[in-house]
Image (spheres, rainbow, N blue to C red):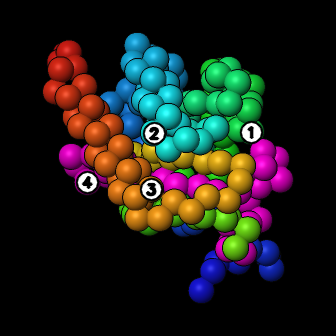
Amino acid sequence: MIPRAAGRLLLTPVDSEAPARTRRLRSLGLGEREDASFDNFDAFADRVAEVTGVPFSMVNFIDGNRQFYAGLHTPAGTRKGSDLGATAAGSGRHVALDHGYCPHVVVRRKALVLEDVCDYPRFAGNPVVDDIGIRSYLGAPLIDRTGIALGAVCAVDTVPRPWGRAGLDTIKSLARELVSHLDRREDHAPRF
């Protein structure tokens, strides 16, 4: 059953883990602002785009109120969140929870493969379809050592794509690699 509010389809899933995720993101210094590792996340997003051959890719951390593109690859190389509907405030990399599919990946705690988002009524109505022209999505959760899904890594395209098993395996492998990076980052963080 798909949740409805006032007779319309809800585009974002119910996220009971959001408070714990928000605390964890803050403890790691992720999801709120650009930091010293920001360029590393952008480089990782570049790599995701290169490996998957897509025009857009993201490393996305999600708290209870919004999404933050810590890593971003855009077709023109501008790295502007506004290319994906992000707000102009701050870094311009924050976006509402109803934009895109990463919140679904985080709540499901499983990879999501949408070869053509228009084939799925729940996903076809997402604002990114009309605003940006997104037609396919491939994303995997970033589940850290504590078992919390911090966000997602994803690849998106403006044309339908037959991701297949190879695409699924690739995005899951990339997510594991990034989580290992986050674990090492935490292990080497200064203690106060």
Tag 2: Cα neighbours inside 10 Å, few (<14), some, or many (≥20)? some
Answer whether residue 47 is magenta in the image: no
The spot of residue 67 in percent (x, y) is 57, 42
> Could you tell whether 132 is left or right of 59 in the image?
right
SS for dot 4: loop
- Total number of numbered discs in the rendering: 4
Q: Which residue is mark 3?
A: 167
Q: Amino acid at mark 3?
A: Gly
Tag 4: Cα neighbours inside 10 Å, few (<14), some, or many (≥20)? few
Q: Is residue 168 above or below residue 156?
A: below
The spot of residue 183 in percent (x, y) is 22, 34
Q: Which residue is mark 1?
A: 85
Q: Which residue is mark 2?
A: 51
Mark nearer the viewer, 4 or 2: 2
Rounded to the nearest whole Å, what is the CA distance between mark 4 and mark 2?
27 Å
Q: Quadrant of the N terminus?
A: bottom right
The spot of residue 169 in percent (x, y) is 35, 57
Q: Which residues are magenta?
A: 120-148
Q: Quadrant of the C terminus?
A: top left
